[in-house]
Image (spheres, rainbow, N blue to C red):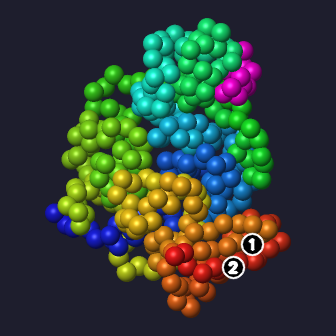
Amino acid sequence: MTVLGTRALGRATLARQLLLDHADLPVLDAVAHLGGLQAQEPQEPFVGLWSRLRAFDPAVLSDLLTGRRVVRTHLMRRTVHLLSADDALAWRARHDTMLRQRVLGTYRRELAGTDLDELAAAGRAVMADGEPRSMGELARALAGRWPQPGPRPLGEMLVAALIPMAQLPPRGLWRTKAGVRNAMLSSWLGREIDPPSPDASDPVGQELLRRYLAAYGPAASADLRAWCGLAGLPAAVDALREELVTFRDERGRVLLDLPGAPRPDPDTPAPVRFLPAFDNAILGYHDRTRIIDDAHRGLSVAGARVVLLDGRVSATWAVKDDTVTVTPLRSFTRADRNAVAEQGYALASFLSDNESHRVRIAEPSP
């Protein structure tokens, strides 16, 4: 079985994540190809798409949100994702059990003894009037009947797990600050959620696996699980095994892949890319060493925005007073500094409507 080194896996990830070359894809197609973008920080997907698409116009993404072709909803890993409407409806039921388990993992004691099916039915009855509500408003509407859990556990179970919800605009629009207002996903999108499949071969899981490998492969089952939060999709993997190709990584793990997917030469030049907080190019793996050193792994879950240099996380970045400040995680050569500065100028311009091109490269982190 062919062994793929860290650099080869990193280049494959960059190619699949649209980070090796800016893609000439419509915004909706890019969101779908990536299997959604993590979006609990509402403005971060705009930077994620700017780093991936040629001539990205943020107004297009805002229009897709208001036009109900993309939607903000809890899904993979119980985190808020920006997904195509089609994917949200097709994938939501497959995630139901995981979403419940993840909320219970946080609030098991508070929700002990609560009939979750009964709670879900009561929540749907409240939301049936079509009025958008915050999590707190929905929890307070039911607190008289379920006083014991408290509003936070009650609200999180309802909004993040029991009732498929959409976070409505203006939340998530370009340069817009707005609180979370929820509506039932099927009501907002005007279509019902696809029902769970009785097929033991897990057809939705098969589609998730194909789509994951197209955007993240080659990857191990543990990486797939880290991306979606589901338990490895063993039935889907078994059903598709004959159409997949396999490799090993340097740790000996078996990696699955689509036979025709890009696997660039490890020496393919990789341009500087600025990634937003919680980008799935990093979080979408259990073993993230293809793109980030283990010593810096904590950055990926702490909400740090990072800079890729030669395909690896090599700096963090932040914006203050229209200035993009880059803090290296290692020493930069002169060529490194010039390449990072050039891309930083472009980012500063994007974020400021061409009013600022200011970039500062700080001293490396100790």
Magenta stretch bounds? 129-138
Q: Position of residue 153 (x, y in %)?
A: 56, 25
Reply yes or no: does residue 131 show up in magenta: yes
Nearest the viewer among 119 and 35 is 119
Residue at 73 percent across and 25 percent down: it is: 132
Residue at 58 percent across and 12 percent down: it is: 146
Which comes sooner in the sequence, label 2 or label 1? 1
Please say if the residues under marks 2 and 1 sit with CB atoms less than 8 Å apart: yes
Reply yes or no: does residue 156 show up in magenta: no
Labelled disc at residue 323: 1
Q: Position of residue 11 (x, y in %)?
A: 40, 70
Which residue is outermost to the bottom?
Answer: 334
Residue 194 vs 314, above or below: the answer is above
Element carrying mark 2? strand
Q: Position of residue 354 (x, y in %)?
A: 80, 71
Residue at 59 percent across and 36 percent down: it is: 73
Residue 230 visible somewhere in the drawing: yes
Residue at 52 percent across and 10 percent down: it is: 118
Under mark 1, the amino acid is Thr
At label 1, counting other C-alpha atoms closer than 10 Å, the crowd grade (few under 14, some 14-19, many 20 or more) is: many
The dominant secondary structure in magenta is loop
Under mark 2, the amino acid is Arg
Residue 195 vs 49, above or below: the answer is above
Labelled disc at residue 360: 2
In the rendered structure, the answer to whether residue 338 lies left or right of residue 93 reads: right
Which residue is outermost to the right?
Answer: 355
Nearest the viewer among 75 and 109 is 109
Element carrying mark 1? strand
Q: Position of residue 245 (x, y in %)?
A: 24, 56
Which residue is outermost to the top?
Answer: 145
